[in-house]
Amino acid sequence: MANLLWLQGGACSGNTMSFLNAEAPSVCDLVTDFGINILWHPSLGIELGDAVQAILQNCVEGKVKLDIFVFEGTVINAPNGTGRWNRFAGKPMKDWVNDLADVADYVVAVGDCASWGGIPAMAPNPTDSEGMQFLKKLRGGALGLDFLSKKKLPVINIPGCPAHPDWISQILVAIATGRAQDIALDELNRPKTFFTSFTQTGCTRNMHFSYKVAATEFGQRKGCLFYDLGCRGPMTRSSCNRILWNRQSSKTRAGMPCIGCTEPEFPFFDLAPGTVFKSQTVMGFPKDLPTGLNKAGYMKLTAAAKQASPQWAEDDIFII
């Protein structure tokens, strides 16, 4: 039996809504088949008020073992580092985060906000929000650069806005079944099994990307969404086109560009307030290139690919 406690900080509850739609395994499967005991969750727990405070305090004092501490949303430090703008169960949420992380075997950050600050941490960041162990790409966050859980792992980041439900449930299963040490993490503490390949992997529009045939409108059934519509698929690490949403689709399959929501630069890639988002291309060439390419080489590749584009790449085929 693995005791799990889930709290929310500066959040929209989007990751909770995603988690409740998990299918492989489902939330019910986590409880019935994999031995996860949910001590409390904001949307699932029936305890209120003093009863919730007692659950948290019992974990902090070691009266109840805390195997997995899951946090959704940002850690709010305002005003002036006190965290009083986000109080919960009798004290600032940031204090609960630190106290519970200190006694948990494993700490999991779910979603962009908990991973690296997300939307609340955009400039000017009035709530002084940060992620559990990152602020954007800067290591440190609320728990500090050197934080390790009781089982000697850093915060396990499962980013996304929201995170895919099966990313969450499968990592929880790995922890609950004693395989947490097998979870290989990348340089941003993301599980490599979900965040090694680019979102472009498995995209049904790859043939259009190869021949530089561009979609010009959202929802268009043909064409690559990178050139004119700003798709971040070639530089975003996620498995959205390998592990489909609702087992059916993804943004690019539906004709919408990837917005790069599993990367710490999301949202808007550190644009200051008031910045007007401009086209992804300049004179027909992308401003941000896919990882590993230089501008001169890419310009030559683009020109050659467009010349070689076959008729079927221009046809209005239906993409599934």
Image: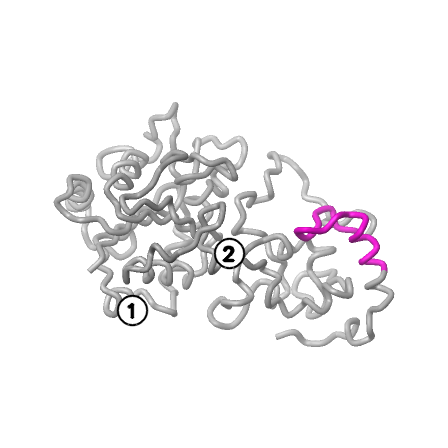
Q: Amino acid at mark 1?
A: Asp
Check residue 287 for magenta coloring.
Answer: yes
- At horizontal 44% and vertical 45% (from top left) the residue drawn is 115
Check residue 230 for magenta coloring.
Answer: no
User: Horizontal placement of 36 versus 262: left or right?
Assistant: left
- CB-based contact (under 8 Å), mark 1 and mark 2: no
Q: Residue furthest right?
A: 307
The answer to which of 190 and 130 lies nearer the viewer is 190
| Residue 85 location (% of width, % of height) | 35, 32
Q: Give the position of the N terminus as an image quadrant.
A: bottom left
Q: Which residues are magenta?
A: 285-303
Name the secondary structure under disc 1: helix
| Residue 86 location (% of width, % of height) | 33, 35
Q: Which residue is mark 1?
A: 29
Q: Is residue 315 above or below residue 76?
A: below
* Residue 142 falls in image quadrant: top left
Few, some or many residues within 10 Å of mark 2 (<14, 14–19, 20+): many
- At horizontal 35% and vertical 37% (from top left) the residue drawn is 147
* Residue 76 falls in image quadrant: top left
| Residue 248 location (% of width, % of height) | 51, 72
* Residue 273 falls in image quadrant: top right
User: Horizontal placement of 141 versus 266: left or right?
Assistant: left
Q: Which residue is mark 2?
A: 195
Q: On residue 225, which mark appears?
A: none
Q: Is residue 245 above or below residue 140?
A: below
Q: Is residue 188 above or below residue 33?
A: above
Tell us which disc is closer to us: 1 or 2: 2
User: Horizontal placement of 176 versus 257: left or right?
Assistant: left
- At horizontal 68% and vertical 53% (from top left) the residue drawn is 290
